[in-house]
Amino acid sequence: MICRRKLIDRTTHLQWFNLISLNLSAVDTGKRYIGHSVDSSQKSINNGNITTIDKMSLASNLACLVDESSPVDERKPMNRLELKRYLELRIKKRVKDQYKNGKFHDLIEKVIANPYTLQDAYDSMRVNSNVNLSSECDNINFTSLAEELASGKFDMSSNVYSISSRRTNNEKLVLPNLKTNVIQEAIRIALEVVYRPHFSKISHGCRTGRGQSSALKYICKEIANPDWWFPLTFNKKIDMRILSKLILTMESKIEDPKLYSIIHSMFNAGVLNIEFGAFAKGHGLPQEGVLSPILINIYLDLFDHEILNLSMKYEVLDASDDGQRDESKLRSWFRRQMGPTRNGGYTSGVRVHCCRLMDEILIVVNGSKEVSMALKSEIETYVQGSLYLDLDSKTNILQCNDPRGVKFTGKIIKRTVIESPAVRAVHKLKEKVELFALQKEEAWDEGMVRIGKKVLGHGFKKVKESEIKHLADYNSVLSHVSCFRKPGMLTDHWYKVLLKVWMQDITSRKHETEEHILSKLLTEKALPQDLKDSFYVFQNHVKRYISSETKSTVTLLPESTVSSESVYVTEVSSPLKAIRMCLQRYGITNREGYPRACHTLVLLDHDHIIDWFHGIVTRWLRWYHLCDNFAEIKLLITEKVRKSCIRTLATKYRLHESEIERKFDSDLSVLPSSDDYEIDSVNAIVESRDFYYDEGLLYGIPYSGLCLLSLARTVSKSRPCTCFVIGCRAAAPCVYTIHVMQRQKFPVWNTGFSSSIHVSMHGKRIGLCKHHLKDLFIGHISLQSICFDDWK
């Protein structure tokens, strides 16, 4: 492996190590430089070749000593996001230098087949893997790899490997090795320089500042008064026709036959794993390489431009219906595209909206159903005829006011009614009146029961044992009562028996409780009729007021009250049923929905068990934080996950749950309980903005990587193992087994997470160091950071 280039100028040297090192201080960097400067020779990479630099002179060494005593520029170490931006910026500058005559030329020969570029791409992958760049790295000779790429001698088929599943019909999955991963990363960065500035505004996903959050905000806030909508669901793996269409599209901006030859070789080797539909792309799926997101966006950018043309067609043709015949149709269309008018409203007529999150598309139409059906027909014709993609035939056009809503990104989008302030005021008043009446009814019932118990107790106390035994009149009531008292029966027990007999005599079987008997059949009969009538008349008036129509009540409000018309808004809700299914699938709950111990994790250390549950909470709260039913999701997740974690630890240590909570109180603080799910600890998870929210750089790592691992074996001296994470050479103390819980294309209705794993990975074993096991569990890395070369 070639070394990182040695910079002669000391200032540049210090700046470089400050940029790539997160742990070394500037003083340590200066000391390291002096140690390098007295070597017998130094090596530097220049245009892919290794040249020798003469020994530094005595004057240069003395100058370094003088500079060392001067104040050192101590900079704050860069985080992962800043470091990745810096590394990609170095490659992007080389790509922009190849722009000539409206196209990019020779990207493979001049940019990608460059040791500098390959080294930066490798470092970028290490940053994704949360590996310190100053640590030991893999032994890769970037100079020879660059020469192979430039000469076209790189054999793609020998640098991939395949795994198959025993459960299916020999279904194989082809994955790239480390060298192919580096090449794909370099190509990805180069393609993003070319295409990212030209992507349409309707495109979201794997772009900086344009992820699932921006897509949902656009649908909810930018689309006003929609009438019809329908999703587009693709179902097609990449084939030769799609690949040829993709390369033909890329040739309009890039002129480089060697680049297209490498892409063809990846396709022929089966390592270009791209599938339109089934699940979200580019979010940590190991079966999809780093090239999948950018290639999907490039290919579907053709659709973005076509939908723009169709929207212009339908909106301009409909402009004549706006009553503005003197104005040009094109000018009217531009005015509608600019948004609201000065009066705050939109111009009338047809409007077509589109939102695309990778390969998930939602079309929204302001207009008639006939226009929507014609638009849908043209879109299907274009997708099938020009893009060679298959569409789900079950997709129907739905009315936006349909309470069922439409499915998009694993969520339900629907239009709901928001009541006006006047209507909300009436409903609030009704709730207060109903609560007041309920309180009075409860006080009335409690008073009746209390009086009835006192009356009944007073009557029973008059019956004394001495009076009953000496009664000569056997026809008296006391004589009949005495027969129910058995020898040795206590007085309180006797009272209860008498009450039961009395209840049977008055045929009170239809009544549920003794309190009801005492209040309704004993106490209320003795009350004055006027008192009873006044109470029940009040309750009847309350019931009539509550059940009355809201509109009739609004008319009684003052004229100054605002309009009582309701307003429709677009809301996003998460499928709670699907979340419960995922909780059950991962062993957190049982079939009845109650938390249970996750037995797969029992053999892991307690801190790793807590990290796994913590990762579920952070992933799901971040993914659903824009949903309108987020409060229900927080309560569901925090209640089930925390309880399951406690029961898993209780199973591991064979202790009571209360003892587990006391023993691991500080560790369990990362899992908010259902009692305090509204506190700042939960909000901090949602509002964290460090490196998690740039999907253009880290591909949605915080949302993905959710997998279940069990301990397979511990590593011994006879069977050593290193960490499988790319760029990590640390020893792995244990080997873990991957359990595929959410398989590819299953279930059909998923939660929107890209945690579907190819079935061939089920049961495979990987070695992980403690640091990266924690990172994988809590969501700092994904399965794309795992290099599965050691499986071979």
Image (cartoon, helix red, strand yellow):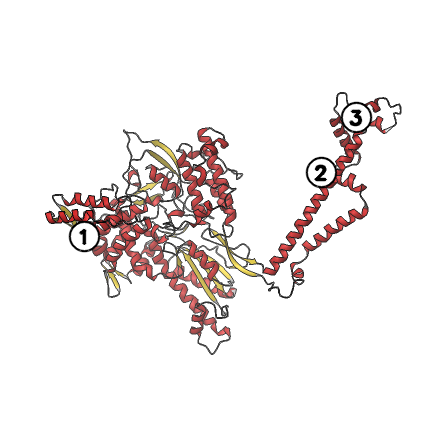
* Residue at point 33%, 59% (across, down): 196
Q: What kind of element bears circle 2?
A: loop
Q: How many marks?
A: 3
Q: Which residue is mark 1?
A: 151
The three-letter code of the residue at mark 1 reads Ser
Residue 90 image point, x, y percent: 25, 54
Task: Categorize mark 1 by other alpha carbons within 10 Å: few (<14), some (14-19), many (20+).
Answer: few
Foreground residue, 501 or 487? 487
Q: CA distance from mark 1 to mark 3?
A: 109 Å
Q: Nearer the viewer, mark 1 or mark 2?
A: 2
Precedes in sequence: disc 1 or disc 2: 1
Would you say 97 lies left or right of 523 here? left
Residue 277 image point, x, y percent: 41, 52
**Circles 1, 3 touching at the beta carbon (< 8 Å):** no
Which quarter of the rendering shows the N terminus? top left
**Circles 2, 3 touching at the beta carbon (< 8 Å):** no
